[in-house]
Image: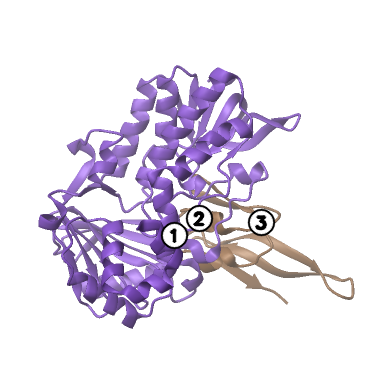
Chain colours: A purple, B brown
């Protein structure tokens, strides 16, 4: 490990990998560190991503695609299932990845591009000289070292600490953390090409329960509930166990995954002097779906591009790096987060009866495109009263 | 069963100026899935996930937010008299 790099990337998930790969491709010296002993494990993800979204970053490869999706189903609290089939959606719409292999591939590509990669290595403190972030103290197997960097990209995930150490509050509000558990189950009866979402305050309060196929008879069966709805006797695991017992009593669980997914607004500011936040650490998870893979890759890549520009210009002040913050906020991704935040805030206030009514009314619509935006637009057409309740949101998507 | 480890003692000074131990955060390490959900909500930044080990730092106030959100119920605030 060198003692000085142009860019230090903290975290080897999709955000960190894309940041490291992009920066290395720009000719910068890059060091990526991952605190875990292996890239990609443990998985903290339901592993779904849209086909077009993925294609922006990498060509699909069967080595890390578990299943292809051609549709989706939404199950209302009353048990009614609304299906969004492939005929509507125009063929394959998305994939369920195998993140253990996918993440490894992304980091492999970063390494191939020239980035140094160190696993079982964690950042334990920022190095600050004259009030300016200069690098990070790293710990690996009992050895403490210091690495200087012009730019640090914090891709340290939902449990991000680097910002806090630097004095930036990244705390997720309790009501906006999705307390989550997922079982990788096999030997279960499922539709192997459709993602199914179960809604309702009895099933998954202020969240949802998902069945994302991983094969013909295998799936990620998971749940996220709001942190404020979680507590002794009614935790995410309690809800999931109840569902599994009833729905897949003979299924076999081959992996148990836990995690937290933030559904808050992104950090107020994702750039500081010599520092940028990307992916889950920037809290750029889609607040409605909880999906974060695309947003992580998008922000990781963009941060590295801005870092390269700013290094070339010799200005790594917050003011210069704010280009990154502005660009992702005004991007399609940034606008989608803002819009979906409003929708999420609306959805979590609905009673089961209201949810039933909405899902029944949407199922009667003739949808030509499978997207959240189409769903909402059609929903507004069918329920003009919603316009009043969703004022700001409605205006933003017309 | 692996013994749970008591990670933090919260010390408070009451009205009479006497020091007393009020609450502490207990990490049941056999239950913890080392996922970091608790770390993200800790208002004090007192929790840290070091690979597969949840570390509780000195500034923990035993507020219990982490215990509430834990997907598995691995954290517990123990009240002492």
Q: Position of residue B13 (x, y in %)?
A: 83, 69
Q: Residues within 10 Å of mark 3 (few under 14, many from 20)?
A: some
A47 up-or-down from A229: above or below:
above
Give residue A265's mark.
2
SS assignment at label 3? loop
Q: Which mark is residue A10?
A: none
Residue A341: image tag: 1
- A58 on left or right of B77: left
Task: Give the distance between the C-alpha atoms of the residues marked 1 and 3, in whole angstroms.
Answer: 26 Å
Q: Does residue A187 sit above or below A358 in this rendering?
A: above
| Identity of the residue drawn at 31% across and 32% down | A105
Residue A328 vs residue A383: left or right? right
Q: Position of residue A230 (x, y in %)?
A: 47, 71
Foreground label between 1 and 3: 1
Whether the residues at callouts 2 and 1 have beta carbons within 8 Å, the answer is yes
Q: Is residue A292 visible?
A: yes
For the C terminus of chain A, the image quarter is bottom left
The residue under label 3 is B44
Asked if marks 1 and 3 fall on the same chain, the answer is no
Q: CA distance from mark 2 to mark 1?
A: 7 Å
Q: Secondary structure at mark 1?
A: helix
Above/below status of B13 relative to A72: below
Please state which of residues B19 and A379 is positioned toward the viewer in this rendering.
A379
- Is label 2 on the same chain as label 1? yes
């Amino acid at each position: 490990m060198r003692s000085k790099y142009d860019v230090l990337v903290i975290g080897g998930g999709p955000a960190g990998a894309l940041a490291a790969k992009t920066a290395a491709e720009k000719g910068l010296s890059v060091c990526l560190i991952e605190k875990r002993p292996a890239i990609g494990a443990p998985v903290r993800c339901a592993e779904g991503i849209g086909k077009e979204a993925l294609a922006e970053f990498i060509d699909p490869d069967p080595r890390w695609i578990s299943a292809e999706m051609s549709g989706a189903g939404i199950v209302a609290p009353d048990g009614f299932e609304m299906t969004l089939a492939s005929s509507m959606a125009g063929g394959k719409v998305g994939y369920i990845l195998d993140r253990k292999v996918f993440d490894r591939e992304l980091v492999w590509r970063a390494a191939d591009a020239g980035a140094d990669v160190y696993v079982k290595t964690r950042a334990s403190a920022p190095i600050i000289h004259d009030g300016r972030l200069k690098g990070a103290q790293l710990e690996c197997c009992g050895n403490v070292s210091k690495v200087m960097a012009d730019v640090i990209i914090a891709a340290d995930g939902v449990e991000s600490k680097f910002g806090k150490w630097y004095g930036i509050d990244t705390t997720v509000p309790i009501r906006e953390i999705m307390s989550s558990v997922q079982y990788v189950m096999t030997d279960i009866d499922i539709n192997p090409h459709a993602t199914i979402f179960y809604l309702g305050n009895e099933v998954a309060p202020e969240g949802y329960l998902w069945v994302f196929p991983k094969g013909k008879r295998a799936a990620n069966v998971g749940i996220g509930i709001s942190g404020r709805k979680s507590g002794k006797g009614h935790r995410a695991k309690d809800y999931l166990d109840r569902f599994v017992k009833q729905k897949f009593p003979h299924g076999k669980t081959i992996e148990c995954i836990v995690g937290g997914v933030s559904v808050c607004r992104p950090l107020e500011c994702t750039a500081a002097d010599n520092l940028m936040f990307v992916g889950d650490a920037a809290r750029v998870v889609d607040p409605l779906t909880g999906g974060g893979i695309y947003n992580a890759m998008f922000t990781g890549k963009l941060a590295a591009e801005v870092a390269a520009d700013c290094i070339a210009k010799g200005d790594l002040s917050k003011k210069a790096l704010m280009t990154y913050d502005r660009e992702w906020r005004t991007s399609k991704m940034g606008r989608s987060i803002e819009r979906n935040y409003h929708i999420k805030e609306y959805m979590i206030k609905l009673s089961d009866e209201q949810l039933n009514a909405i899902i029944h009314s949407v199922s009667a619509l003739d949808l030509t495109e499978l997207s959240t935006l189409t769903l909402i637009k059609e929903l507004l057409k069918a329920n003009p009263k919603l316009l009043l309740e969703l004022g700001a949101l409605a205006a933003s998507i017309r | 069963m692996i013994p749970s480890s008591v990670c933090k003692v919260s010390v408070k000074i009451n009205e009479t100026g006497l020091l007393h131990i009020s609450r502490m955060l207990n990490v049941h390490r056999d239950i913890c899935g080392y996922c970091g959900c608790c770390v993200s909500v800790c208002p004090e930044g007192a929790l840290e996930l070091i690979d597969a080990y949840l570390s509780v730092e000195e500034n923990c106030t035993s507020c219990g937010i982490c215990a509430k959100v834990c997907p598995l119920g691995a954290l517990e605030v123990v009240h002492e008299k």
